[in-house]
Image (cartoon, rainbow, N blue to C red):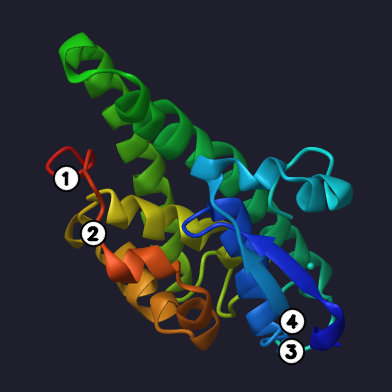
Amino acid sequence: MAENMFLFWGSGSIPCWKPMIVLEEKGFGGYKNKLITFSNKEHKGEDVLKLNPRGQCTYTDKGTQLIPTDKAKRARVLQRMHEAAANMQQKLVLDLLYYFFQTKEEDRKEEEVAKKVEAAKEELDRWEAYLGETKAFVAGPDFSMADVWFYPFIAFSVRMGLELEKFPNMKAYYDKVTARPSVQKSWPPHWKEEPAKFSPFKGRI
């Protein structure tokens, strides 16, 4: 089946990384693919737009069971997925990280930064508590689609300087998920080759 798949992806893109982890967890490694460069607007190229008119990077039933069949477990996985998509993305990426990307240093207001950092800390504390309850993955004892949605946000934040020593449950989780073959095989190649150009989270969270 992998030979019938073709994936357009961008290195370090969280929306791209999620389906790549899923494909590896499902045993579909070795699929045809093309690495596109966002800075060159290749995601707006004709071959991409033909498949996805929105020009965005874009799940199967084999390998790891990522969505449980048990109703209560399924509900928990779906809940954590939506929490990660809404809250982690909003408070760590859109509110805080993009603020550093889009605002010149001389234009940043410390009181605004402090407010955004506090909101990010509160969100991280919530997930730290979740992981303290499960002692494993974000929705229970097994790796699930909730982890596919949550983990890339943490990995990206670590690259941006997040110090997980302050969050022991999350640190243990990060180390465990990072070691999964699906994550290692789909790890953003440019992360291996070069460090982040700046670390806005370092010393703040």
Q: Tag 2: residue type? A: Pro
Q: Real-space Cα distance between discs 4 and 1? A: 36 Å
Q: Real-space Cα distance between discs 4 and 2? A: 34 Å
User: Farthest residue toward the left?
Assistant: 203
Of the 4 image quadrants, the one containing the N terminus is bottom right
Of the 4 image quadrants, the one containing the C terminus is top left
Whether residue 129 sits left or right of residue 118 in the image: it is right
Image x and y of residue 128, in percent: 37, 56
Image x and y of residue 71, in percent: 83, 67
Q: Tag 3: residue type? A: Gly
Name the residue beneath numbered marker 2: 195
Name the residue beneath numbered marker 3: 63
Name the residue beneath numbered marker 4: 65
Crowding at dot 3, Cα within 10 Å, few <14 / some 14-19 / many 20+, comes out as few
Q: Residue at x 63, y 47 (%)?
A: 42
Closer to the camera, 128 or 13?
13
Q: Residue at x 48, y 70 (%)?
A: 134
The nearer-to-camera label among 2 and 1 is: 2
The nearer-to-camera label among 2 and 3 is: 2
Q: Tag 1: residue type? A: Lys
The nearer-to-camera label among 4 and 1 is: 1
Q: Residue at x 46, y 57 (%)?
A: 12
Q: Earlier in the sequence, mark 2 or mark 3?
A: 3
Q: Real-space Cα distance between discs 2 and 1? A: 14 Å
The reply to whether callout 4 and callout 1 are in contact (CB within 8 Å) is: no
Q: Real-space Cα distance between discs 2 and 3? A: 33 Å
Crowding at dot 2, Cα within 10 Å, few <14 / some 14-19 / many 20+, comes out as few
